[in-house]
């Protein structure tokens, strides 16, 4: 066909499609209420209903429960109820969503005479249904200040493969800036490997301190992968990885230079990026490959093709990151998951802590059990 | 030998990278819904030829995204996901409709989902749309994504899960057929 004819047919198609598109929905027709937010989404029964029902209803429930004080006043802003994408799942699932706000006891109404209770909304950081490494803490963020976490601790149940497991809350200033404090929940040792973990927070209406109540009830279900631990030895400039006690391999690394030493302690992989922009003083690389984040301020495991000589030569030259040969980085990127543990027993930098990332495992258990910034006992 | 600066500076400063937020639930589903509902319903309407099914398809696509949104942080990725969902769900609408039509053929010989909103569309467009409707599925989808959504070959390939080469050949075969069918009408 000639170019002219092709142009003509293309133009005609564009116009026809555009005409039909506009005929189907006008430019001003407002969208209907989204089904994902109305709780009427009914996934097929063949799907994983238990996991799904809460998810499908989460927006509705959070919207309903999130604005609990405003049960009668629908005009009250309930913006915080809208953001449920982080996988915080409400466990009063479909039934509660369908029966609507009237079935929800209003804690504010039960407090006679006094000032109305302030309600605090809990969101979980972790994704429902995800598979994490055994070092992954459960992280909760709060919409307002909480002053007493004992009722929260009492309302928390953790089971691993159906059996109860002791896990405790610890509160620290939120390094991610998600409110004043973050609550981290973890057992004494890493989570058991290859396990199904269920966390239940029956917190709706539960006190969070004087005049404060939680306004939502949540569950979290996740599974753990193998017990994969990477130990980075700064003396030999190597990283040794074991998975379920079996050795996986030893990889040469280059850690932070004297000016920018790598932090020591137990770190946990926070996120993975195939291709990430990393920059520092006088330097910016828009495409660093196989990057696995270990701290908020930017320590990663990553491929450092520009630094092969120093990686193989046992010299610490990075800005804090753990530089890996491209082949090792690719392999580790494939094998490690968010929540896997990377330890730096002899790195010369400052101590790893919750303020820097998922530094949970550096807090001694005796300290952990006090609850940190908010008392749990 | 790499320059020293390249060796030195692989540690980002706090302000430069988009860090803590990358770990925070970021996709605002309601905002996405408001922003893309119209576009997606129109896309689905082009694919399934009726508005009610198209609206259904888009609702289902958002429910699917909502179910999955824990794993998605990037709004662009979310839109790509929605687009692919709309494509897949539209296909099942068409499949279901074909089955229904086979069973209903006797009772309802005129049962056709062809758009009643075509009345709002000019005759010349109607002929083109009818010709597109008769194309094989892949060709039809590729043409809609190319000439209505304005996606690049690569984006179409990603949306449909086929190779860019298949996109190219489906588009040219589709256009050739249309040219043959409609060619006589063109001046």
Image (spheres, coloured by chain):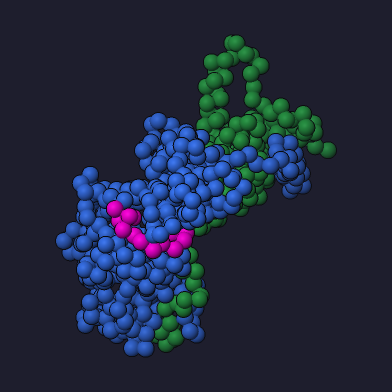
Chain colours: A blue, B green
* Picture layout, residue A235 above or below residue B44: below
Q: Quadrant of the N terminus of chain A?
A: top right
Viewer-proximal residue among A218 and A134: A218
Residue beneath the point at 65% across and 33% down: B51
Which residues lie in the magenta part? A141-154
Residue beneath the point at 35% across and 69% down: A373
How far from the left and from the top, in percent, is residue A21?
70, 39
Is-magenta flag for residue A144?
yes
How far from the left and from the top, in percent, is residue A199?
31, 50
Residue beneath the point at 63% across and 31% down: B52
* Picture layout, residue B83 above or below residue B49: below
Q: Which residue in the rendered view is the most extreme toward the left? A: A245
Q: Which residue in the rendered view is the most extreme toward the right? A: B187
Residue A321 seen in render: yes
How far from the left and from the top, in percent, is residue B131?
69, 32
User: Is B117 on the left or on the right of A54, as rendered?
Assistant: right
* Picture layout, residue A346 above or below residue A71: below
Q: Which residue in the rendered view is the most extreme toward the front? A: A113
Is-magenta flag for residue A84?
no
Residue A275 seen in render: no
Viewer-proximal residue among A304 and B73: B73
Q: Quadrant of residue B102?
A: top right
């Amino acid at each position: 066909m000639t170019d002219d004819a092709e142009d003509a047919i293309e133009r005609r198609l564009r116009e026809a499609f555009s005409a039909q598109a506009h005929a189907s929905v006008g430019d001003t027709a407002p969208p209907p209420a989204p089904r994902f937010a109305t709780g009427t989404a009914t996934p097929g029964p063949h799907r994983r209903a238990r996991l799904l029902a809460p998810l499908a209803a989460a927006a509705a429930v959070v919207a309903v429960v999130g604005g609990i004080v405003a049960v009668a006043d629908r005009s009250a802003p309930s913006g915080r109820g809208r953001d449920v994408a982080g996988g915080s799942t409400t466990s009063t699932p479909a039934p509660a969503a369908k029966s609507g706000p009237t079935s929800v006891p209003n804690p504010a109404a039960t407090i006679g005479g006094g000032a109305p209770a302030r309600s605090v909304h809990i969101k979980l950081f972790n994704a429902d249904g995800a598979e994490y490494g055994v070092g992954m803490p459960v992280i909760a963020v709060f919409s307002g200040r909480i002053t007493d976490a004992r009722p929260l601790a009492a309302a928390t149940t953790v089971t691993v493969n159906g059996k109860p497991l002791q896990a405790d809350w610890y509160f620290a200033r939120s390094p991610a800036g998600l409110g004043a404090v973050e609550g981290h929940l973890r057992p004494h040792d890493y989570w058991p490997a290859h396990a199904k973990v269920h966390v239940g927070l029956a917190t709706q209406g539960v006190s969070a301190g004087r005049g404060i109540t939680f306004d939502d009830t949540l569950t979290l279900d996740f599974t753990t992968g193998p017990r994969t631990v990477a130990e980075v030895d700064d003396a030999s400039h190597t990283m040794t990885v074991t998975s379920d006690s079996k050795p996986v391999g030893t990889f040469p690394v280059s850690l932070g230079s004297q000016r920018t030493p790598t932090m020591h302690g137990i770190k946990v992989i926070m996120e993975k990026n195939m291709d990430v922009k990393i920059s520092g003083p006088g330097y910016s690389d828009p495409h660093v490959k196989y990057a696995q984040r270990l701290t908020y301020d930017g320590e990663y495991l990553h491929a450092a093709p520009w630094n092969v000589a120093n990686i193989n030569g046992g010299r610490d030259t990075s800005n804090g990151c753990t530089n890996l040969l491209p082949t090792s980085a690719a392999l580790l990127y494939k094998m490690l998951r968010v929540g896997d543990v990377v330890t730096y027993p002899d790195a010369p930098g400052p101590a790893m802590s919750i303020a820097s990332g998922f530094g949970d495992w550096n807090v001694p258990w005796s300290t952990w059990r006090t609850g940190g910034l908010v008392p749990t006992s | 030998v790499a320059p020293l600066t390249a060796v030195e500076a692989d540690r980002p400063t706090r302000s430069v990278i988009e860090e803590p937020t990358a770990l925070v639930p970021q996709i605002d589903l309601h905002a996405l819904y408001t922003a893309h509902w119209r576009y997606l319903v129109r896309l689905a309407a082009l694919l399934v030829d009726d508005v009610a099914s198209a609206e259904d398809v888009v609702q289902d696509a958002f429910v699917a995204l909502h179910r999955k949104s824990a794993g998605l942080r990037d709004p662009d990725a979310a839109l790509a996901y929605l687009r692919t969902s709309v494509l897949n769900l539209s296909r099942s609408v068409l499949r279901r409709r074909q089955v229904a039509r086979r069973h209903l053929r006797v009772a309802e010989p005129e049962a056709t989902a062809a758009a009643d909103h075509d009345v709002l569309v000019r005759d010349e467009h109607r002929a083109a749309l009818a010709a597109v409707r008769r194309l094989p599925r892949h060709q039809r989808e590729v043409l809609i994504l190319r000439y209505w959504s304005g996606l690049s070959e690569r984006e179409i390939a990603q949306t449909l899960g086929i190779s860019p080469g298949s996109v190219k050949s489906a588009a040219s075969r589709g256009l050739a057929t249309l040219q043959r069918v409609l060619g006589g009408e063109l001046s």
